[in-house]
Image: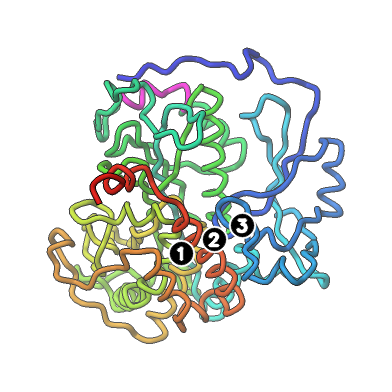
Amino acid sequence: MTVLPRVAVGGKSKKSEGGAIVEAFVVDGNGVPRGKWVPAEKLSDVSDKGVLMPRSVFAQDIWGRDADEAGLAHGTGDPDGLCKPVEGSVLPISWLSRRATQVMLRMVDADGAPFFADPRTVLENVLARFEKAGLTPVVATELEFYFIQPVEMAGERPRPYGADAEGFKGWQQNVLAIDELHAYDVIFADIARYAAEQGIPLDGMVRENGPDQYELNVTHTDDVVRAADWTIMMKRIVKGAARRHGMDATFMAKPYGGLAGCGMHTHLSLLDRAGANIFVAEGHEPGGKLRQVVGGMLETMKDSMLILAPHANSYRRLTPASHAPTRLTWGIDNRTAAIRVIEQGPATRIEHRVAGTDTNPYLTLAVILSAALHGLEHASVPPEPFAGEHSESGAEGLPTTWDEALGRFESSDFIGRALGERYRHIYASVKRQEIEEFRAHVTEFEYDAYLRNA
């Protein structure tokens, strides 16, 4: 069992009273918070006047470089956009060594309308369609992650906390082990405290399948945009708490090639105008509306993969004979399927299991919800639920490469309707730039395989 040391940041037991800051940020297409620090005494200016940031912040690749093809920077003069505080987002940041306040921002146009390329706006546009249909989505996210040794050098491979250079100790899986939670009590206590300070309702913590892998569940809500906010905030909290205790945390989809990946399972139910769950079945079989939603999700899943699996590493997680789905399957309480239906009376819901924790939660919720609407609008009919191991189902496979996912995304009418044509172009431009960058780099493994043997 790993013993967690008590590490005070900078050797201090109290926060410095000097240099208090406001951390103001938007969330880009990759789900990365990007913004600036301003002195604490300027909080009123941030709240009242907002913050200027380049509009191209929403067309940056994972390394923070402008994707010129997107058209928000190159050829436009890279103009600023006004970013206004999100209601209820002025919150304390307790994991830094100084007093700090968080302000989440959203970008608006000159007339005050939401800026189309802000992922928050993309999700809000989808929710407007639900409101028109008289339906209220209720969602919750589950976040898997790994605690790892501090990464200090570029290219350094991750190791579980407590493992030495040869990998001795720290590699145990110990799924659901209570003692593993006890070993990290001090850090989980901080995570719970930070979450409470930021108003995030946690619904549980569990030891997962990989070494030093854990899952945090966030309580369900009918405020879908807030659910995405909470997901971003929880990732910040986990990483911040880890650093305060001499560790790192990663939400990378597959940090270890032969071990469990990190998924962001998303739970969904739909309420009608009377507040009734339209998924509740009559008798013991899934109801017709639930089947239509499942059908819509399966019909549009291939086109959505660039959102659900946005990075090169994302596709390493989607491997056969694991709990990560690789086929267009659904089942009743089947954790190997892409769509798991959980029948619990009034709490009957769908668990969408494809996305990794490396996704942007605003965009992931946008495509999942758009798929649900697609199913209802087209009265989609799914195949019969599958009860066994999904890899043995014979069902059609999901895209297995980044290139295939990009191609389907760019040509999909569904994505054009779900995210908007203009945003589809921006997101695809960013991903194409990232793919080209990966192709320009030869890996250590390739040299090992081919340098002398080819």
Nearer the observer, 373 or 285: 373
In magenta segment, residue 45: no
Using residue 148 as the reference point, say whether residue 173 is left or right of it.
left
Residue 362's disc number = 2
Is residue 343 visible in this depiction of the protein? Answer: no
- Which residues lie in the magenta part? 179-187
Q: Which amino acid does label 2 sit on?
A: Tyr
Residue at disc 1, secondary structure: helix
Q: How crowded is mark 1: few (under 14 residues within 10 Å), some or many (20 or more)?
A: many
Residue at disc 2, secondary structure: helix
User: Residue 392's spot in the image, x, y percent?
Assistant: 12, 63
- Identify the residue under disc 1: 307
Q: What residue type is labelled 1?
A: Ile
Looking at the image, is 216 positioned above or below residue 324?
above
- Identify the residue under disc 3: 28
Is residue 408 visible in this depiction of the protein? Answer: yes
- Which label's residue is closer to the chain start, 3 or 1? 3
Overall secondary structure of the magenta section: helix
User: Residue 83's spot in the image, x, y percent?
Assistant: 76, 58
Q: What residue type is labelled 3?
A: Asp
| Real-space CA distance between mark 3 and mark 1, rounded to the nearest whole angstrom | 13 Å
In magenta segment, residue 185: yes
What residue sits 32% from the left and 48% below the top?
446
- Which label's residue is closer to the chain start, 2 or 1? 1
